[in-house]
Image (cartoon, rainbow, N blue to C red):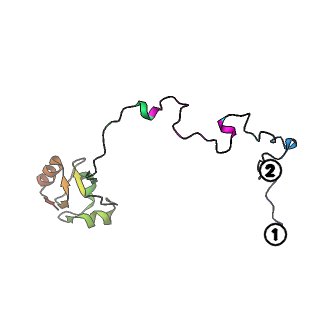
Amino acid sequence: MELNSLKPAAGASKNRKRIGRGTGSGHGKTATKGHKGQKARSGGSIKAGFEGGQMPMHRRLPKRGFTPLAKKIYSVVNLSQLDVFETGSCVDIEAMQKSGLVKNVCDGIKILATGELTKALTVKAHKFSATARNKITSVGGTVEEI
C-alpha cells in the first residue's frame, strides 16, 4: 500500500454542489435562488436586524443602564479555601497563586467569609468583607490590606 493509492471509504466524501451549470445538473437556471426578489439578486443580502422596514427590535426597546469604565474586578477567595495553608503562615498574592487559589489577579484579591477558617493566618489582600475580617481575627490571625 502506497500513500498515493489511498482513497477515502465509499460514501465518506461528497461532491460539492455546482450551481448554475445547466438544467441537467438540477441546479441550473435560477441556481437554487428561487424566482426574483432581493435575495435572488447579486449582492442581495439583508443586514442583520432588518425587519422589512418595520421598526427593528433593537430600536423598539429602551436603552437601559451603563457600564462603568472605572469598575474594579476583584478575584474572590473564600475563607474555606485558606485552610490549605499551615498555621501561622503568611498568605499573600504569591502564596495564593502558587497554591492555585487565584489564577489572574485582575484589580486585586477580595477575601469573602464563605466557610470556616480553623488556623491562625496572616492574610494580605486588597479587600476583605467585614465578616471575613472578623472571622480571621477571632481565630487569632491578622488582616493586612495591601
Q: Give the magenta range.
A: 38-57
Check if residue 51 falls in the magenta segment: yes
Q: Residue at x 28, y 62 (%)?
A: 96
Check if residue 132 falls in the magenta segment: no
Specify whether 144 is left or right of 82. left
> Which disc, if any, is residue 4?
1
> Which disc, if any, is residue 11?
2
- Give the position of the N terminus as an image quadrant: bottom right
Q: Residue at x 30, y 60 (%)?
A: 105
* Element under disc 1: helix
| Amino acid on which the number 1 mark rests in the picture | Asn
Q: Residue at x 15, y 48 (%)?
A: 130
| Amino acid on which the number 2 mark rests in the picture | Gly
List x then y, in percent, for residue 94: 27, 67
Specify whether 55 is left or right of 144. right
Circles 1 and 2 in contact, beta carbons < 8 Å: no
